[in-house]
Amino acid sequence: MDTSGGSVLGVVLTIVVLALFVGATARPIWRSAVRRPWTAIVAVVVIGIPSLGQFAWPQLGAALMRDPEATLQHGQWWRVLTALLAQDGGLAAAVFNLVVVALVMLAGDAVWGWWRAALLFVGCSAVLNLAALGWGPGGGTSFASDGLLMAVSARLALEGGALQRWAAALQLAAAVVLIAAGDAHGVALALGFALGAALTALSTRPAGAMPSA
């Protein structure tokens, strides 16, 4: 299973999923999000410092990234969590990933509340990085961002209108294509949607005013 997300198909479908997310996320959600950006700011700062710092000090990235041999043979299980803080796609990809973190955290806080958004973000990353011990080394925020993005999309689809349902359906179709192509980001998208749908069924907190279209 490829965890880099660097294939042409992976890049194109990532852009499609993000565009659907931004376009279908209700305006009231974004208005609420920009009034309380602190969860997004904290996430970008906490992740951004080591993610960008690794380009000045490569040993920092090496200490944080997912490393199956170091984890399984030498007990460095912290890497399942710290892989979130290192980027494996270069500086441009790191900056892009931080922008995506800001977007999904803004929407996630507005839809789920800060602590559930943070739990979905970190939880999806940990689960996928644990699974990825069998796929290869690496790091980055894409597992976390994909998971939270789809958890938001799931709630909007289940509580919103036709626009949100169609957007979620297309995002899930993209996830299926990625999984079929052997791209691990499809797994992250599917996991996030499943968690979001389950939490929506259990939740009593209104997600906000949803448009009917």
Image (cartoon, rainbow, N blue to C red):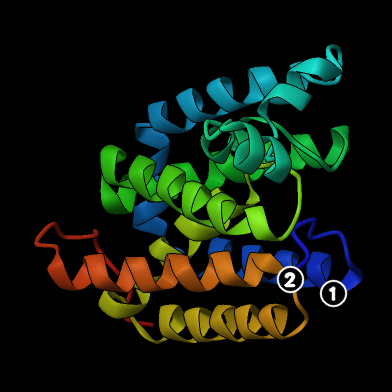
Residue at left offset 44%, top offset 43%: 122
Quarter of image, res 184: bottom right
Q: Is residue 22 visible?
A: yes
Residue type marked 1: Leu
Q: Nearer the viewer, residue 153 or 135?
A: 135
Residue type marked 2: Asp
Residue 48 is situated, as x and y percent measured from the top left of the image, at 65, 24
Q: Nearer the viewer, residue 21 or 210?
A: 21
Q: Nearer the viewer, residue 72 or 117?
A: 72
Mark 2, Cα crowd under 10 Å, few <14 / some 14-19 / many 20+, is: many
Can you tell which of label 2 and label 1 is closer to the viewer?
2
Q: Which mark is residue 183?
A: 2
Q: Which mark is residue 168?
A: none
Residue at left offset 70%, top offset 34%: 65
Mark 2 touching mark 1, by CB under 8 A?
A: yes
The earlier-in-sequence mark between 2 and 1 is 1
Residue 213 is situated, as x and y percent measured from the top left of the image, at 39, 83
